[in-house]
Image (cartoon, grey):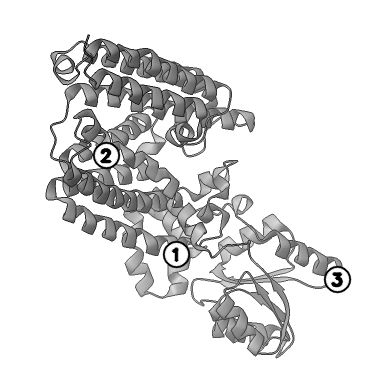
Amino acid sequence: MLHESALQLARTQPAAALQMPVWLASGKAGFKKQVSDRTHAHPASLPFNEPFLEWLREQKAAGRSLVLCTASDASIAHAIAQHLGLFDQVMASDGVLNLSGSQKANALVQAFGPRGFDYAGNAAVDLAVWKVARQAIVVNASASVTAKAQALGNVAHVVPGAPGSRTVLLWLRAMRVHQWLKNLLLFVPLMAAHQLQDVGALTTLLEAFLAWGLCASSVYIANDLLDLESDRQHPRKRRRPFAAGTLSSLQGAIAVPILAGASLYLGALVGPGFLAWMLVYLALTWAYSLSLKRMALLDCITLACLYTLRIVAGSVAADLPLSFWLLACSAFLFLSLAFVKRYAELLVQRDAGKTRAHGRGYEVSDAPMVQSLGVAAGYTAVVVLALYLNSATVLMMYDTPELIWGTVPIMCFWVSRMWLCAARGQMHDDPLVFAFKDRASLVAGALFCAVLMAASAHYPW
């Protein structure tokens, strides 16, 4: 809870968060109190271990007295105890005493006597308490902590965590590796310039793809950590590893700088220009995570910029000139996708009976306006594409430029389909991920590429 509260403070009160080193210097108990006094606990959205809660209810029904003894600050402990309605007493850190490890063991022995209580815990610091407890209950602990607890000889019950909660797959989910599909946008300038046969440029872009992927993953994790409360109130996002509690916020906070550092190192290898655009992307995503995502309209414009930045960075990495038409078409298309993302989220909130999108600047009643803005942006992208097809550049690049007009109805169909699926409530949280899974979108993409190839071919007639 301490790490989550500190993250909440960093998001809501950045100026106060700068004082955290000073608070920590006065002691951990004082630090916890300073943070908890400036944040709000929301027990209803916390990812409780349901099998353990059921076991506690059975113990309560059997007539046992339950005590919530935690190292969290007393204000948080009392809020959780009141929400659960299971505990007869609360013991917690109070701003002076940090109730953890040996101090917790001493407090429990003083209150109930040696071997006068059973204790449930999950961390290595709880070994000091288990040593003086009558019985140990191990809850969602690592294999090493469980083994050490069992070596004490008083383990009465083990409550496992979620299946596969410590697997590589879970980290891949947290990093949202499937979202790396967006980074294929880095290759768009190379495709538009008809330079796919350039092995050197392809190799550079593959390195850029990996660098941008790690950079994006660091941002995804940071965003999840700063948005825990909102994610836990979302029907689908609450299953994300950090929101569900299968990965701790501390683990995420450690992973963010590691991933970001690795991405910047790889970005520097690609080239200084590419690295500069990665830094712009990082700055903009942090601004989005900390404030812009809660500003209506500005959030969608920012998302569109983040998509478009990938195309700009791809042109820099491959050392290719960037077409104004490509940039304009991409910007409007991505603006439409950003609006479709928000529109889909508003429909989810509406179906859940809510009037506002938590952590966003929209009311559910804004959905029709968001839909109108998004459809308009999508069709503007189609118009820009049509204007581009009539430019001198197209006449020079394609041997049969008449055929390329076939891309206009294809793009018109795809934009329309995306919004139709969103209106039907079928849209994924991320429209690009939806497009890569949607058969009709894949067929439209294949036809789009086929038309471009056909227009590039030379015919004898």
Q: Quadrant of the C terminus?
A: top left
| Residue type highlighted by circle 1 | Gln
Numbered disc in front, either 2 or 3: 2
- Mark 1 and mark 2 lie on one chain; the one further toward the N terminus is 2
Q: Secondary structure at mark 3?
A: loop
| Horizontal relation, residue 74 to residue 193: left or right | right
Residue 393 placement (x, y as % from top left): 14, 18
Which residue is labeled 3 in the image?
63
Distance from Cα at disc 1 to Cα at disc 3: 38 Å
The residue at the point 54 percent across, 65 percent down is 166
Numbered disc in front, either 1 or 3: 1
Q: Is residue 13 visible?
A: no
Residue 33 placement (x, y as % from top left): 48, 66
Numbered disc in front, either 1 or 2: 2
Tag 2–tag 3 contact (CB < 8 Å): no
Dot 1, crowdedness within 10 Å: few (<14), some or many (≥20)?
few
Distance from Cα at disc 1 to Cα at disc 2: 30 Å
Q: Secondary structure at mark 1?
A: helix
Q: In the depicted view, which residue is nearer to us: 388 or 128?
A: 388
Which residue is labeled 1 in the image?
251
Say which mark, if any, is on residue 186: 2
In the image, residue 146 sits, relative to residue 415, either above or below, namely: below
The residue at the point 45 percent across, 37 percent down is 433
Q: In the rendered image, which quarter is residue 277 located in?
A: top left
Q: In the depicted view, which residue is nearer to us: 461 or 249?
A: 461
In the image, residue 50 sits, relative to residue 62, either above or below, namely: above
